[in-house]
Image: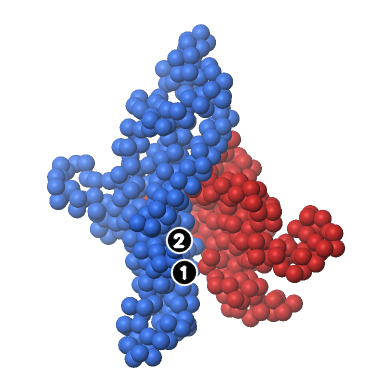
Amino acid sequence: MRALKAYFRSPAALVGSAILLAVVIMGVGASWFYPGDPLGLAGRPLQWPGANPRFPLGTDSSGRDIAAQLFHGARISLLIGFVATSISVVIGIAIGAVAGFYGGVTDTVLMRVTEAFQTLPNFLLLLVLVAVFGSTIETVTVAIGLVSWPPVARLTRAEFLSLRTREFVQACRVQGLGDVHLILREVLPNALPPVIVYASVVMAVAILLESALAFLQLSDPNVPSWGNLIGLGRNVLRTEWYVSAIPGVAILLTILGVSLVGQGLNDALNPRIASGR
Amino acid sequence: MRVLRLALWRLAASLPTLLLILVGMFLLLQLAPGDTVDALMAQMGGGDARMAEEMRRFYGLDLGIAARLGQYLMRLVTLDLGFSAIYGKPVATVILERLPPTLLLMAASLSFAFFFGLLFGVVAARRVNKWPDTLISMLGLVFYATPSFWFGLMAIVLFSVYLQWLPAGGFGDITQNYTGFAAMLDIARHLVLPTLTLGLIFLAIYLRIMRASMLEVLSLDFVRTARAKGLSETRVVAKHVLRNAMLPMVTLIGLQAGTMLGGSVVVESVFALPGLGRLAYESVVQRDLNTLLGIVFVSALLVIAINFVVDILYARLDPRISAES
């Protein structure tokens, strides 16, 4: 409750929440604002924003409504961001918790694997995964989750390392409680706040990764993704640059919103830990 | 000497990691639909099954996975990365040709991000909670949120199409036959926009870290001592604070070497730079898995090498490491 109050006192958190709320409304209400296929032909191609009152943000080179793609794209970006973040946070917590709680050989092996993932450029790994498993929206989302867990694992491990020797954990151990109980019920709740804050960074990175992949036309071409639209707009960049410019602003604002919310959460949940890690 | 030994020890410790990556990648690519022979046959316009079998035997693809993995690792020791069917050259040659632009781009972006990150971080920390700090912090947030490929495209529109100050892409002007200094200048002109594009997000991260680190160091006792000695504020910052505050930034270089390489895939595609990142993208599109595996190997080596350099740099900056026995 106090954390909630602290959260809403921070101007960064308020602005971030407002932006994010707007994007969520865009995504959730996309079918209501723009019923019909956002990737279907809507009118004459390459109409500048404002030129035709029917298309306030203009049309792209295939005559599709940019505003409609923007709204439906919000849904895709949020969905991918949310699901990929959940996947990577779950993997990261599982590996970090086991490594930090048990230590020893288990820790060494798991940390070697984590290091391997961190040594490999994650966008490169993402390219390999897409090359191997194809680029449907599902595989792309899972692949993004699979490449972004290492920092979460390291963070969780560090928390577990410092928490596992505390007295309250030892007290539970003396009572004869099992490891599973200790990990899930005793240590994890205390280790969670910094991980939750870091999840905002993971989400921002996930959205950026998907849009970069879509920009390279390596993501699912059958969904109205912002990155896709920027990539297609590249062909008419010299004259009709607005096709690429508009969805880019949408990505920028969304990431900004996510980062600001993360900063607000950080200030509210762990005021002593410096932000930006 | 001790520092070097420490760094070499870390280097040796990264060998199992490298092995893990290679084995993992090799097994992962076995799951990919189609192999080199399929790609070659498609390029030749098809062929019968008997010929495909012959070719598989020729390339050693008829062996079991374990045998091929063993072969692959043995060949890697001699730096033989295999043959690229698409480029018709050994993979090592293809990669070596593409390495210089990427290295140049990474070095330039890193220097740009590091220098301005340091500068902005120091300015923000010295005017903490005043308007320069607020402005710099806001700028950092916006830079962090800007997708690099989009920034690159918008920079092309502004600087290449409208203002016509800088070239829109490529690694040099191929219509002119520049040599010597003129060629260097030409490449530099072509690298301005890619450098800004790749460096932007790292600038944002560095300035935030530098600001936080400066604030932390400024509150330490030895800074108070330095002030009590009557040193001017500029001298305190330059002589005592800066070196200590830089340490987290140096660590970050090593941690983000991989991210930067990944980012260069996108940036090189935007600016049509003939580098390693663009090669990675092309080999995904063309299903040239041998080359892709080679790029993964070289990238991992590169990241490990950067971390080696960072370790030494860190030890040189931090007197505590070399002093303790």
Task: Say whether residue B228 is left or right of residue B178.
Answer: right
Task: Examine the rendered structure and indicate whether residue B244 appears above or below residue B12.
Answer: below
User: Who comes first in sequence, dot 2 or dot 1?
Assistant: 1
Q: Position of residue A139 (x, y in %)?
A: 62, 41
Q: Nearer the viewer, residue A92 or B39?
A: A92
Q: Which chain is blue?
A: B
The amino acid beneath tag 1 is Ile
Element under label 1?
helix
The structure residue drawn at horizontal position 36% and vertical position 63%, both measured from the top left corner, is B316
Q: Which sits in the foreground, B85 or A270?
A: A270
Q: Tell me where residue A22 sits by quadrant.
A: bottom right
Q: Quadrant of residue B95?
A: top left
Chain letter of disc 2?
Answer: B
- Label 2 SS: helix
Depth order, front residue of A133/B103? B103
Label 1 environment density (alpha carbons within 10 Å; few <14, some 14–19, many ≥20): many
Give the farthest residue toward the right: A175
Q: Residue at x 42, y 55 (%)?
A: B6
* Residue density around tag 2, few if under 14, some if 14–19, many if 20 or more, within 10 Å: some
Residue holding disc 2: B252
Q: Amino acid at mark 2?
A: Leu
Which subunit holds the residue at mark 1?
B
Residue in the image at 60% along x and 76% along y = A272
Depicted A130 relative to depicted A150: above or below = above
Identify which residue is drawn at 44% across, 20% down.
Answer: B40
Q: Residue lying farthest top?
A: B50
Q: Which residue is mark 1?
A: B209
Q: Are marks 2 and 1 in contact (CB under 8 Å)?
A: yes
Image position, residue B65 (x, y; %):
56, 24
Left/right of residue B148 with respect to residue A275 in the rendered view: left
Looking at the colours in the rendered structure, which chain would you say is drawn in red? A
- Which quarter of the image is occupied by the N terminus of chain A? bottom right
